Amino acid sequence: MAATTLTPYEILQVKPLDSDFQLRVAYRLRIHELKKDRLNFPTNRKISPAKFRLICRAYETLSDHDKRKIYDSSKEWTSTLPLTKYTLQQLAGEPDLAPQLRDRLEKATLRQIDAKDPKTDQTPLYCAARACNVDAVYHLTEQGAEPDLAQRTGSTALHVSAFYGHPEIVRCLLESGADYRKQNSYKNTPEKESFDDNVRNTFTDMKKQPFVQAAADQLDWFKENIDTIPNHIDEQYYRQCQTLLHCASRKGFTDLARWLVEQRSANLDIVDNNLNSALHLAAYGGHTAIVEFLLHQGANSILINKWGMTAEQEGIVHGTQIVTLFQAMRNRNMFDMAAQGVEWWFKYHFAGNSPDATTNEGTSLLYIASRHGQTSVVKWLLENGANVNIQLTSVSHSTSLHTAAYNDHISTVELLINHGADVNIKNHYGETVFDNARSDKMKNFLQQYRKNLLENKILIVHLFGDGRKTGNEPLAKLQLNWNATRDDLWNAMPESLRKEYHSFSIARRPLQLQEKDTTIISAFCRARYGKSKFVELPLCITAHESPRYVNSGHILGEEVIDYNSREFQAKFMSKCQNSSIKIASQLNKIQKFTCGNLSVTFPVNCASKQLSIDVEYIDSPDLQTFKLPECLCLFRTKFQGKNNALEEMPNVVFNGDSNVRLYSWIQSQAYWFAHKIRHGRLPFIDGVHAFIRHVDIIPAALNLPPDMFIQAAVGKPFNTRDHPVYCRYLKIREHKTDVYPHIAYHGTSIKVIPSILMDGLVMPSTVVSNGIRVCPPDNHIARGVNVFDTEDFSNGIFVSPSIHYCSDPVYAVTFSDGDERLVAVLECAVKRDAFKAFPSTVPGYKGHEGDDLTAIEWRLTNPAAIEIISILFIPQIKSRIAAARLRAGKLGVNPNDVT
């Protein structure tokens, strides 16, 4: 740009004797002229970037006292400046330099982003707000710029945007957490500095918003108005999708944060657009009191934000101040945590401790949790490898089952037994769990367990009520024979339920039990969305007062009979190897046998008389012959002789592969079943069993039965593609374009994918196969609310034609696969005319190319109108370690401290 002959005064259109205030007014007028000019088509604009650049240089010269004095004396000033010499403040002050600002910010540390000019104390955000550089303001706040930093006269970015008459910037800053109470050195709040009514009205409107009040630490306002605020306490506001707790935690408002959690039950672990939880923001801000409070409330400390950082790592910018709090939590006494039932402590802070850790007196964690009836901690310990039968090393030698029964914790006893607790182990006093039971209720429970075992009642059914009002726990837990029919189910139900409930469904797919000889297991498998031959117990069935969902359009699967018993016998006997084992009677120690690759372990005192069992087995049976994909061992067990019975079933392990599950065959049908918890325990002796290798889709996060998806190649279930985004994908079924012509997407959590594949996408309040009642998150649109002229809007299934929309953190939960961070998205096919399209309901969602924000959310009310055809695994962070190192650079700390 050529040097100008105009003086700075002429460029700003002011007089040499004008005051500083008059200079600011003139600069404000020039900025408003630019705003107005930018509304014209580019060819009709009169203020070029070069011309506005001169205005900026002129104002810089005259607004600084020293520079103005030098200019008045020498008549020399810097009218041009290479972009390489620009400060962040100068880039932020010129809207046409938005790309250059973004590039510079990518390399800038957070200290540089919030750095103040050495003379004026102005930050880049202050300069962007003054120039009405909307893009820069949004980008700076999203990058972590602090909106409340003051320049030399105490004014903040909110003050300057109000004075310069930019209601859009005022709104943006308030949405980003700016504090409207801040006063400058003239005792003026930003609202008092408002240029016109447009700005004043913006303040009036925005101060009605709970988020804006939270950013101003207005606890009294919340106490007075909370009952009239329509928003849920966990509502996510504006472009950054932050909750009130996010806001209070980020700004260090301890009393407000405590009130939101303790009095209003705010969710601790909701994440914002940057995947930051409230704990992340409190740690980053160095707010020790809030970090400590959130940790003690059970905030998830292992969540990872979009920069690959935990909350603890975000806090390293404050040295040891924050890190020490996390270390102190990890150092809590694990035995106290077990006794108190603090499940979240084990989940987030147990780290490398052993689940079989014992006190100096020899009391295990599991024993302590069981003694106190802390079922959730017992469950966590068992699922993380605790030995269910470990005995006290003290004089009593009791097990966790002994103490749970003695203290009358039935749910704990049930969980322990399901995980293989041995009911026949005797303590030092010769007592089994049956001897330790004191209450009639506990005695009846244990007697029923033994009776079910002897009567071979292996089919477990959990019966739920329809609708959320019936609760989330089963109405009844039933055990039936494997060939049980509707009448058997009916007779097993408590009398009070038989009078009320007459029809049944799974995941709102009606069970066809009209034929008297139709088995429960057959009807269940035919009604499932997923057509796997592998079934997990318990069967979660919903009971209804009258027939429901019969006209919903669900298509029943065909009755599958792969082979009959005689055919199977002939094929099996032609290929199997034989072994025989003998079980001693009333032996007070375990008995272990090896049959090929099988290890069979019988519990103590499991037989009242000596028994012999034949084991016939085939390793890696032929797929074509037995139709069992990924079967590593097919085997049959049978008693020698008649009238043989065990008082406890053995555990069987396949040696050589840990990612296998034990299934048993329902003879005369194609179905094989396993218990969700009792992975290695034989349900019966006289029968056929198989170890099936589940396919590791994402190790430690997702594995599936081998017939739930279309195998791409042996050992390589994934395909890759670039459309509509790059991803790996798992093909579930072929796309039937004639029936389901539309493609849409549904973001989800990888944890619920097995249930979705088995049950399909379901309506809210549906109980699915894992026993969970599916309900929309509390911070989403509530049930019963009329939105977009649609009654009870949230009572539907929501998908989107935009893969970007459903990948938003509001819908899709990130997870790790090695060093990579991804989201799981279901690719769905939808029937024609089966949905209605609505605008975005995600605050601050930024549209991508091809998005139609007026019709980006599709709502369906019939689950039969949608099919899942693929699961997409979409990268969000290619390397968490690399991302964390970059973030460390932003924080200005040693990258080695975060890896």
Image (cartoon, helix red, strand yellow):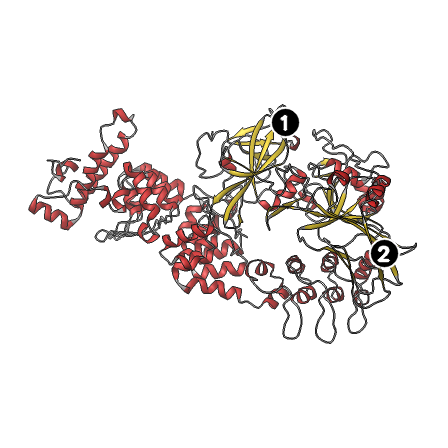
Q: Which residue is mark 2?
A: 613
Q: Secondary structure at mark 1?
A: loop
Q: Secondary structure at mark 2?
A: strand
- Circle nearer the N terminus (2, 1): 2
Q: Residue 668: percent from the left, percent from the top?
A: 83, 40
Image quarter where the N terminus lies is top left
- In the depicted view, which residue is nearer to us: 749 or 573? 573
Q: Residues within 10 Å of mark 1 (few under 14, many from 20)?
A: few
Front label number (2 vs 1) = 2
Quarter of the figure with residue 542: top right
Residue occupying image coordinates x 21% and y 40%: 56
Q: Residue 548: percent from the left, percent from the top?
A: 73, 34
Amino acid found under the numbered disc labelled 1: Lys
Amino acid found under the numbered disc labelled 2: Ile
Q: Which residue is mark 1?
A: 736
Q: Are marks 2 and 1 in contact (CB under 8 Å)?
A: no
Q: Residue 517: percent from the left, percent from the top?
A: 86, 37
Q: Is residue 233 above or below residue 38?
A: below
Quarter of the figure with residue 444: bottom right
- In the depicted view, which residue is nearer to us: 890 or 793? 890
Q: Which residue is most to the left?
A: 73
Measured in 3D between alpha carbons, the distance from the residue under mark 2 to the one under mark 1, in whole angstroms, is 50 Å
- In the depicted view, which residue is nearer to us: 615 or 684? 615
Can I make out residue 673 in this image? yes
Q: Residue 6: percent from the left, percent from the top?
A: 11, 36
Q: Is residue 295 above or below residue 62?
A: below
Quarter of the figure with residue 196: top left
Q: Is 807 displayed left or right of 570 in the figure?
A: left
Residue occupying image coordinates x 60% and y 61%: 342
Can I make out residue 544 in this image? no
